[in-house]
Amino acid sequence: MGLGFFLLSPDHHRRPFSDSIRRISLYSCSVLTQQRPLAHRFNHCESFTMATTEQPTNLDTSSNNVTANGNPSTHQQKLDEATRGMSHEEKAAATNAARFGYGPLAHMRTAEGALLPAFGGEFQPGLYKPVEGRKFANPAPLGLSAFALTTFVLSLINLNTRGLAGVNPIVIGLAFGYGGLVQLLAGMWEIAVGNTFGGTALSSYGGFWISFAITLTPGGFQVVSTIESEGGGKAVLNSLGLYLMGWFIFTFILLLCTLKSTVAFFFLFFVLDLAFLMLGIAYLRPVNGEPSPGCTRAGGAFGILAAFAAWYNALAGIADTSNSFFIIPVAHFPWSEKGKASRAEKRDIEHQA
């Protein structure tokens, strides 16, 4: 931009061409020397400008040495003197800039060019916004939040809160939209970022909520009415009991994979597994043709714990130093890799003390 601006400015006929080059070179050189003490910047740039804009009077093309009036190149000597103290990278950049006349081809990218004001479009406050490449966010908090809210509402109904009981349509809506669709999407995004466990867990529980909503939608898919017409009410209870027991087994498998993670993560799957177990028993051991009230309430209580554990883990994944005044503690098991590394670091600090 610099060269074109000086050549096309209205008063260019009043400015010598060499003066334009000098102005541009001073500006370009100031970028290279901006980290240097202020007292040395102008002299340094002035010397560099004179060295790079001064043309030798005689060029010897038969050798690599440039000569001026038969003597060793004063041009090269002045350039070396002007670039003394520069790093190799700075010197190479300055030489290339001089070669292209400080025009557009000599544009240099600096760290300051990546600075942008706070950007709210990504819901991530901060001074930096990536401008190159693409960085995936952590989808786990989204999936955990979707699971937590849907589980929380269903568990409150299982506890007979405010007289609510049975299948409430509000749960079916949540199961389709938030606990189902959103959690399934979060699971797919976990697979995209390379998290096999997260992708398996979130996608599976998203499928659980969708299948739960399909099964219990009144008058929609007629799953319950079809089972009842063929086997009666007991067949419906047994079918739902086996359905929940299957999820109990699956959750137990995932629970085994959390033994080397964090206490909060293990607790989430532990209480969720107990919730599935209690609800499964409630349907397999009915009382007066209805799911066992005691086991249903126990399942609701464990479900509440699972919901809050999921929210806790979600907050731990969202909160960082850029958006929170405190970091959520996640205690690692002593036998986990991070637990071992933490103990080793503490031992090293104690030995040094």
Image: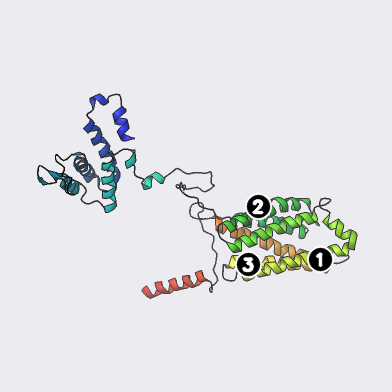
Spatial CA distance of label 1 from label 2 is 28 Å
- Percent of width and height locating residue 3: 30, 34
Look at mark 3 in the image and give the residue it sits on: 267
- Percent of width and height locating residue 63: 17, 49
For marks 2 and 3, the one nearer the N-term is: 2
Look at mark 2 in the image and give the residue it sits on: 182
Disc 3 crowd, CA 10 A, few/some/many (<14, 14-19, 20+): some
- Percent of width and height locating residue 117: 45, 42
Mark 3, secondary structure of its residue: helix
**Which mark is in front, 3 or 1?**
1
Report the quarter where the N terminus lies. Answer: top left
Q: What's the residue type where badge 2 is placed? A: Val
Mark 1, secondary structure of its residue: helix
Name which residue lies at 51% across and 71% down: 337
Q: Seen in the image, is 24 located left or right of residue 158?
A: left
For marks 1 and 2, the one nearer the N-term is: 2
Pointer 3 with pointer 1, Cβ within 8 A: no
Mark 2, secondary structure of its residue: helix
Look at mark 1 in the image and give the residue it sits on: 283
311 above or below 245?
Answer: above
**Which mark is in front, 2 or 3?**
2
* In the foreground, 8 or 239: 8
Name which residue lies at 82% across and 68% down: 284
Spatial CA distance of label 3 from label 1 is 25 Å
Disc 1 crowd, CA 10 A, few/some/many (<14, 14-19, 20+): many
Q: Quadrant of residue 296?
A: bottom right
255 above or below 58?
Answer: below
Disc 2 crowd, CA 10 A, few/some/many (<14, 14-19, 20+): many
